Image (tube, grey):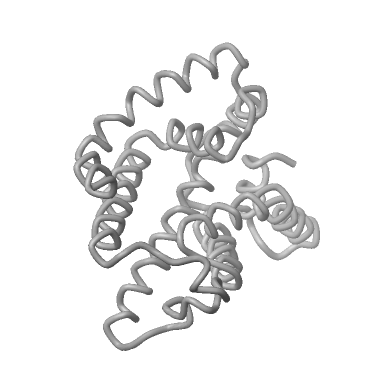
Amino acid sequence: MNDLEALQALAGERGDKAAEKSREAAARHLYYQWGDRLLAHFTLNGAPGAHAEDVLQNTIEKLFLKAGTFRGETPGSAAAWIWTVATNTLDDYRDQLKRQATHGATDLDNPEVENPDPVVRRGPQPEQQTWLAKAQDCVRTGVRSFAQRYTRDAYALWMQAEGHSVAEIAERLGKTPNSTAVLLVGCRDRIRPWLEDCRRYISGLAT
């Protein structure tokens, strides 16, 4: 089963045993093929530990609910759509954290949860934290906007950032390695304007 077949199974009619078996197979496919990669992605982007597991669970639930809205026809477009749903779910999680911050601290605000030795591993100073937060928000906004317009390109860049080879990305997108290599070069060129405004914040981190 590939990503396209998994989404088609989730969007299919319910009721008979064959359909339910297909949905179970689709769920296994999503967890086995996407679970570890998405957990790593969530952890690196602000959802540590059990929080990343929660975001993954919410992502899978949304895939079940929204599979019927997918209109792509290739495994590559299915993979890009899954990645978009996962990214939007992570954004929802970040927004929830911001709302919680206005009502008091959470476990994520405790440096000893993920950093048991704050003396050895000191974080950035307040001014640097401000620049870092602005840089992160700017990059996230730019990438999100880019992904909304160029879903496949954003997914290809994400896979490359995760360390996947051109051959692996090509297989996911249903393209040849040569055409995928050309695509990745074009993706990098296309995303630059979307992140241009972030340079000023990144420069502020170096001062």
Residue located 50% across and 65% down the image: 121
Q: Residue furthest front?
A: 119
Q: Nearer the viewer, residue 162 or 135?
A: 135
Answer left or right for 38 relative to 91.
right
Q: Position of residue 65 (x, y in %)?
A: 53, 62
Q: Is residue 146 above or below residue 90?
A: above
Q: Position of residue 62 (x, y in %)?
A: 52, 62
Q: Position of residue 2 (x, y in %)?
A: 70, 39
Answer left or right for 71 relative to 173.
left
Image quarter for residue 98?
bottom left
Q: Is residue 185 above or below residue 153?
A: above
Looking at the rendered image, the quarter that the N terminus falls into is top right
Q: Position of residue 47 (x, y in %)?
A: 50, 65
Residue located 64% across and 42% down the image: 3
Q: Residue furthest bottom?
A: 104
Total tally of numbered discs in the picture:
0
Answer left or right for 187 relative to 60.
left
Residue located 25% across and 56% down the image: 131
Answer left or right for 55 relative to 188.
right
Residue located 54% across and 72% down the image: 115
Q: Is residue 198 above or below residue 21?
A: above
Image quarter for residue 105?
bottom left
